[in-house]
Image (cartoon, rainbow, N blue to C red):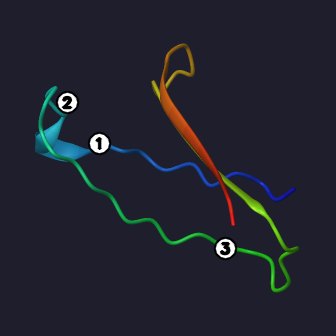
Amino acid sequence: MEDPTIVPACTGSGCPIKAGEQYTQTVEVQVPARLPSPYLLGVGVGSADGTDVLGCAIATI
């Protein structure tokens, strides 16, 4: 398992993101040169201090 990539979802004057507003973010991450077939991809969204989990997703690819 690789180390997680952690990036802020909200920075600057657009924070906080208001409920009901559309939000997208593109993040480039390092992946191993060879991935097993299949492999899992997980995404989690939480508070910066780690006390609140706001959402998560996992996919088998």
Q: Tag 3 or tag 1, which sits nearer the N-term?
A: 1
Badge 2 vs badge 3, beta-carbon distance below 8 Å:
no
Q: CA distance from mark 2 to mark 1?
A: 7 Å
Query: Residue 40, position in %: x, y?
Result: 74, 57
Question: Any mark on residue 10, and which?
Answer: 1
- Tell me the distance, in whole angstroms, between the alpha carbons under discs 1 and 3: 21 Å
- Dot 2 falls on a residue whose secondary structure is loop
Residue type, mark 2 in image? Pro
Q: Residue furthest bottom?
A: 33
Q: Residue at x 55, y 13 (%)?
A: 51
Packing grade of label 3 (10 A; few <14, some 14-19, many >=20) is few
**Residue that numbered label 2 is attached to:** 16
Contact check, label 2 and label 1, Cβ < 8 Å: yes
Q: Is residue 45 left or right of residue 35?
A: left
> Residue tagged by mark 3?
30
Which amino acid lies under the numbered mark 3 shown in the image of this protein?
Gln
